[in-house]
Image (cartoon, rainbow, N blue to C red):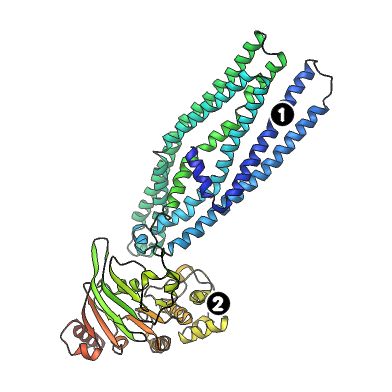
Amino acid sequence: MFSVLKKIFAFAGTKRNLLIKAMLVAFLGAVFSALQFAALMMTLDILVGRQPVSVLPVILILVISMTGRLLCSYWSVNAETETGYFMVAEKRVHIGDRLRYIPLGYFNENSLGNITAVVTTTLSDVENSAARCLVSVVGGFLNTLALCLGLIVVDWRLGILAILGILAYLGVTELSQRAMLRTGPERQHAQMNLVEAVLEYIQGMSVVKAYGLDKDSSQTVQKTVDDSCQKALSLEKSVAPWMGIRQITVRVFAVGISAAALGFYFSGTLSLVRCMLMLIASFMLYAELESAGNMADNLQMLGTSMEKAEEIDRTPVMDINGADLTPEDASVEFKDVSFSYGGRQILEHVDFMVPSGRTTAVVGPSGGGKTTLCNLIARFWDVPEGEVFVGGHSVREYKLDSLMKNISMVFQNVYLFNDTVENNIRFGCPDADHEQVVEAAKAACCHEFITELPDGYDTVLGEGGGTLSGGEKQRISIARAILKDAPIVILDEATANVDPENEAQLQSAIEALTKGKTLIMIAHRLKTVRHADQILVLDGGHIVQRGTHEELIRQQGLYAEFVGVRQEALGWKLTE
């Protein structure tokens, strides 16, 4: 239990001082709460006739006790609520920033559902309960301890007995926490599986409907829901017996304090007033401790949630020793680069040089490693063998932000954010004004359709740009790259989803974008690659041919076959 409390304290980050203040105020509230026993003792003295009949001091002490405790509770609750929300907000931002510097392989091994569960459900548990649990558990313990210290002043024997009750209760609570170690992680894992299954079901709805798999897919989701329910029930069942044991423990000590008080009274070592005070106190003494113990049942789950969130912090990043570098030029070079996904070799001993300001086209069959090659330039992964250079410096020498300032990328599968069209174009250059955004959009042949949208450039796109066609999304992506104006441009089938009537305009826009810049493009269309300064033919992870279009077309090899197939495809016609 105490290890989890310590972990919550460390998790608070910059809000740690606020959390300390909340606990100190909770302790102050416990002191105000203890004043009620002083008022009770004075009342008993009045009732048995040992003090002059005056209730004003009693009322004053009760008012001070109630007011002080109310104010302390109000401030403590506000502080712990603020701590919970802000410390999790900081963690979410931290995770988002860290994900930018983590190899893409992490996202292959850790599904979207897993990451989504961490930043939503998992951290929501921490957000809603962590600070409250810490303050409640520590505050409840301090409250009961303050009352026990007050009892020591009245009678040290009964005070020590009450403190032994606290220690026994904490011991039972610790045992219950250990019992939850087996079921807590299982419940957390089932919850993540549920998020993943629901996301997969929603994102794959078009496939589900197209193949009539509605029933089968819903059964898969139902199975994960049932599994999550079972794990949650198992967690509750593992806690329930210990809740009973904790209640029995405090009842035993409460009865023990009452019996001891009566015994001391009849033996003449405890006055009637003190005996009556102890009899009443025994039923009130452990109330806050019981509340703290019930709240402590959430600690193991919170500990598991925080460990899951911190797993991302333990994932190696690629930007540890980088520096802000200014490249000597816009050249790109691969030196003996080999790369694999897991055990599957993708690139093997690849060497090539792209001079600054020149165009290189990469062609080859699917699965040959073309996209991987381009991704390694942007350091989406680190290569285990060989070296990738940009502007005369190894990509490992750059800070990732510094490296990406020099590279614009247009992907075949474009992703647009759930934001305005203008902000999506401005994504690569946040300081650009509206006129610059419009100019980039015109160059990318997308200004016309943007102005026809309901709110023009202020139209909010759906998640992933789902409200636009594939060609429209790709043109906005190209506008984004034009606006960024980086010296190195990487195009991954940038014209694949563009309709024929706009292809010529878009090709002109790409030529304007890449004029005087280093261009590396993956393409399958002959007219796209034939004017490249250098063509690399990639097959099976190896560069099997390289040269200009005129040089390669005269050779017998994969490129000549590629050109022949394309020309044959363009020349087909329907016959009656």
Choose top left, top right, bottom left or bottom right for residue 558.
Answer: bottom left
**Residue 422 pos. (x, y %):** 53, 77
Q: Is residue 59 left or right of residue 182?
A: right
Choose top left, top right, bottom left or bottom right for residue 48.
Answer: top right
**Residue 242 pos. (x, y %):** 47, 30
Residue kind at label 2, given as amino acid type: Asp
* Residue corresponding to mark 2: 431
Q: Residue at x 53, y 56 (%)?
A: 90
Other residues around mark 1 within 10 Å, as few (<14) / some (14–19) / many (≥20): some
**Residue 559 pos. (x, y %):** 21, 83
Mark sitting on residue 36: 1
Q: Residue at x 24, y 85 (%)?
A: 566
In this view, the residue in front, 416 or 126, is 126
Q: Secondary structure at mark 2?
A: loop
Residue kind at label 1, given as amino acid type: Gln
Q: Residue at x 29, y 75 (%)?
A: 334
